[in-house]
Image (cartoon, rainbow, N blue to C red):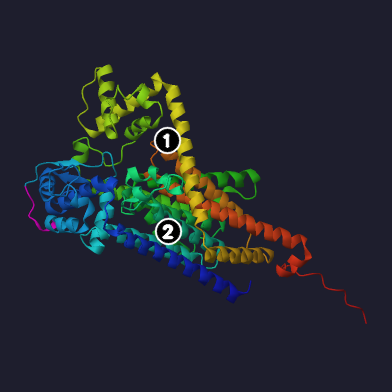
Amino acid sequence: MSGKLGHCMGGIIVAAIIATVALAFRYGVDRGDDGKIAYTGTGQFVLAVCGIFTQIKYDAGRYVCSSGIRQQMQQIGLWFDLTPGHPGFNPWRTDPNFVDNALDQIFTLKAPPEGGLWAFGWGGDAGYMDFVQFAFQLFGHTVQALYYGFFLLLAISVGLFCIQFWRHHFALFTMLAFAFSFSIYLRLLPLPGWEANNNPSSFWSFLNLVYPQGLDSVTNPRVLSLLTLIPLFHALFLIVYRVRPAPLSVILFTPQAMLTAAAGDFRSLAFATPLALTICCIISVMRELWRRKRPLREILPCYWPAYVIFACVGISAVLQAKTTDPNIAASGGMRFHTFWEPMYVDLVTHPQWKEKYAAEHLWAHGDDVARVGVKLYEQRHHLPPSMSDLSFERDVRGAYIDFVHNDPWYVVQLKYYNALTIIHYVATVIATEWTSLNWPLLILAVLVACALALQIRRKQESLRNLIVFTAALGLSAVLIAMPVWATVVEAQIFADLTLCFVVFTFTAALVMLVAAAVFLSERLPDFGRVFPSRINPPKPAVRAK
């Protein structure tokens, strides 16, 4: 493909990517998602606000909340455990103006007596406070700041990717597939009153998996792990195309690595993405060593994007440790999300839970299941009641191990059912994404396939690179799903692994189309004229004079 035509094709794909992301942003605004606090994110939001206010008023460290400020927020009506008779019980979840006015009051009132500091990381990610503070500093103390902050980070990541790979049509198409999948995924989130129009025989019946979890906006903390997918694509393409660590490449990728570390701070489940990248790199290195093509000292420099991510994650961990309030450790609090508690709560998803263990656990729901399980464990082993987050997490671990020891087959069956749930959910979303394809995207996909086939014939692109990236992307999607499968299976935390699987199917289909075009061009003369090879034919012998 000539340079001008290739640049034109790249410009068209980049324009389609920008338009798709912009439409996704606008669609959320039209739905009112920008002024909505997700139901399952209410606790994280108010605790983050309390932590920010505590840090400002008392010069405290990060990830702690003052009891005095908590009482002040409860009086204003901005808290997650208000009684039904409180004036702010319903408005603060449904009326963005009410929340904005409450935020203005909180940040303008004088600080009350401290009343003691306590950590708020148990059951959630205390690092979500960093995202809320980032959004507030850029866009003010409003609910919309969370929405704008998410899309700002997403747009920066997309822009860096497009600048780095503006000459690689396959990479640009992968980004377009992600943008399209993301925009369609937003449309799958339920609207208010969706139950009345829900047709059980249609696809929308699958929203029963989503709506009870409250995943109704990108302002949900559980969606922040999506921010790691584009850096993952960026790193994989740099490795597959063996891009050297030139200054421009490092400058463009370093913000992506920083975003990966920040997303891991915002949402601990986001660390599944760099873990998936690490495993892919290890497999690739082992494959290179097994084939004995190059020595190890020549192989390792090719994986420099992974090293940049590791460095950013390490620096982020040090900064978080330095800024964390010492009261967290002194009080036995936790800054990170619990690990064993969700594993115990996941026991409820087994079909036989009600028959075998619900009565023993007093018919509890949600986190209360783990609390009851801990009390039963402490009674069986004559242990003192847990008085801190760390001791509670330790006892939850003991309670879970006891459960597995007493009924291992129940847990084995549970993981089988969890795997079926993930497969069913992902397959359903993939089917909807494919049925949502429109003709402009299909035409563009065909043009990209033809361009890639022509580039492969002219030795400007390699079919191996396309296959290797697609395989690495599929493996990454499986690896990202592993932490979810191992802990608690809920539809609200399927966003990143679902979209990764969707993009994998799109790229796999494109690679198969390109491979078919290359195969036909090599075996049929007519196709060879359309996709001419760059290899020059032998010149005829020159007659001697």
| Quadrant of image for the N terminus | bottom right
Amino acid tagged 1: Ala
Amino acid tagged 2: Ser
Identity of the residue drawn at 37% across and 62% down = 27
Asked if residue 244 lies left or right of residue 463, the reply is left
- Local packing at callout 2 (Cα closer than 10 Å; few below 14, some 14-19, many 20+) is many
- Local packing at callout 1 (Cα closer than 10 Å; few below 14, some 14-19, many 20+) is some
| Quadrant of image for the C terminus | bottom right
Magenta stretch, main secondary structure class: loop
Q: Which mark is residue 183?
A: 2
Across and down, in percent, residue 92 comes to 19, 51
Q: Which mark is residue 57?
A: none
Of residue 297 and residue 498, the one placed in the foreground of this image is: 498
Q: Which mark is residue 486?
A: 1
Across and down, in percent, residue 121 comes to 25, 42
Bounds of the magenta span?
107-112
First in residue order: circle 2 vs circle 1:
2
Say what secondary structure mark 2 lies in.
helix
Of residue 295 and residue 443, the one placed in the foreground of this image is: 443
Identity of the residue drawn at 45% across and 38% down = 421
Q: CA distance from mark 2 to mark 1?
A: 28 Å
Of residue 287 and residue 204, the one placed in the foreground of this image is: 204
Identity of the residue drawn at 24% across and 56% down = 133
Q: Are marks 2 and 1 in contact (CB under 8 Å)?
A: no
Across and down, in percent, residue 510 comes to 59, 57
Q: Is residue 98 magenta?
A: no
